[in-house]
Image (cartoon, rainbow, N blue to C red):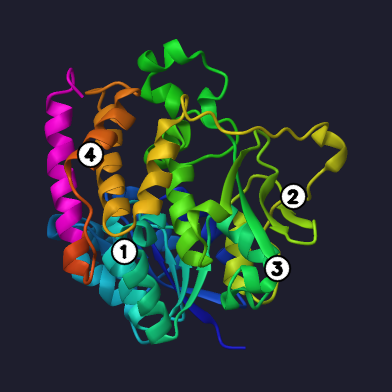
Amino acid sequence: MSLQQITVLGATGSIGLSTLDVVARHPDRYQVFALTGYSRLDELQALCLQHRPAFAVVADEASAKRLQGALVAAGSKTEVLFGEAALCEVAGHGEVDTVVAAIVGAAGLRPTLAAVEAGKKVLLANKEALVMSGALFMQAVHDSGAVLLPLDSEHNAIFQCLPGDYSRGLSQVGVRRILLTASGGPFLQTPLEQLATVTPEQACAHPNWSMGQKISVDSASMMNKGLELIEACWLFDAQPAQIQVVIHPQSVIHSMVDYVDGSVLAQLGNPDMRTPISHALAWPERIDSGVSPLDFFALARLDFEAPDEQRFPCLRLAREAAEQGGTAPTLLNAANEVAVSAFLQRRISFAQIPSIIDRVLSSEPATAATCLEDVFAADSRARTLAAQCVNQRGEA
């Protein structure tokens, strides 16, 4: 069996590192072709020395020169490239079989789309790509024949619980609802009056998952679940009304599918991203992920509750954007990225994140997106308006 050549977009993040852990467990199956990173050059250097990719990609020329010099000094033959064009090159390269799309935010859209257009097997962790350009993205998947597999634990769970022919339509295969589980994050029980004063450190202290700062804040606000709802609509050709969010604090059930005959299929496992990563890497086979077996006797209990949209207004905003369609999800995502960045910089409060998003959505009309330029134009307008809201933070 020839080795599958893997490009990991966003190799230094939590998804990238988990992917490389799984890949390293199966040297008879996988070989790293390219690794990309943004600012963690020392970490990317260590990964290049360990996995010996043909290429590494960084943000700019200065970073490329620094990393290339360090790799040459260490005897590495990895060639260092830089910029968005290079990201797209290693994503769509003729020698690549599989691309793990794990760049956070809008920055991941173009390279992920390049992998799709090249007909690769794409393991999607960059939910923003689908949120921003869902119809265009899925049309590119259809036209190129790319294989698109979800890496988010929730979407991967849904994929595992759906029948193989779900593309015929959920109602055609007897699906009544998709039940999208959410941990509720670190503020599930925090008194509402205290949310205005929570710190970035508190927001990033997720009770179950180890994630980057941006996605951790999104989890705390439940915007992450809102983005996942939009992503699920595109992945599984579902309407927002067919997806119900369920708070499940233990994060053991990763999502469920409810069928018209009353059956509910659930995918369970320890909260470790190596499970969905290994599933998608080897699909339709299964391989060892390194994740320990689920100990049912230690679980004690599994809890479920409906989300409180007063506590989590971002979830309501995301559902409304999904229902509106067009560029509304693009505007939502862009405003959220700006607001979360400002919160992490302590320029706004946690409670101001949904206020800024709401203000952008109320001020900027959503339009149809017929091409990628329409998507990026909407993204740019929303970022400009959100930045103005941040600067007027007392009024947001």
- Closer to the N terminus: mark 2 or mark 4? 2
Q: Which residue is mark 1?
A: 133
Crowding at dot 2, Cα within 10 Å, few <14 / some 14-19 / many 20+, comes out as: few
**Lower position in the chain sequence, tag 1 or tag 2:** 1
Residue 95 spot, x, y in % from top left:
39, 85
39 left or right of 256 in image: left
Q: Nearer the N terminus, badge 1 or badge 4?
A: 1
Position of 144 relative to 184 (above/below): below
> Which residue is denoted by mark 2 in the rendering?
292
Q: For this view, does 374 lie left or right of residue 179?
A: left
Q: Residue drawn at (49%, 44%), measured in percent from left and top?
A: 225
Q: CA distance from mark 3 to mark 2?
A: 33 Å
Instruction: Give the labeled residue for mark 3.
Output: 174
Q: Is residue 27 left or right of residue 81?
A: right
Task: Read off the residue under disc 4.
Answer: 362
Q: Residue at x 39, y 85 (%)?
A: 144
Q: Amino acid at mark 2?
A: Ser
Q: Is residue 377 above or below residue 387?
A: below
Q: Amino acid at mark 4?
A: Ser
Label pair 1/3, CB-CB below 8 angstroms: no
The kind of residue on which mark 1 rests is Ser
Mark 2 or 4: in front is 4
Residue 103 is one of the magenta-drawn residues:
no
* Magenta segment boundaries in residue numbering: 376-396
Camera-side residue: 145 or 72? 145
Q: Is residue 126 above or below residue 79?
A: above
Of the image marks 3 and 2, the number of the one nearer the N terminus = 3
Report the mark closest to the observer, 3 or 2: 3
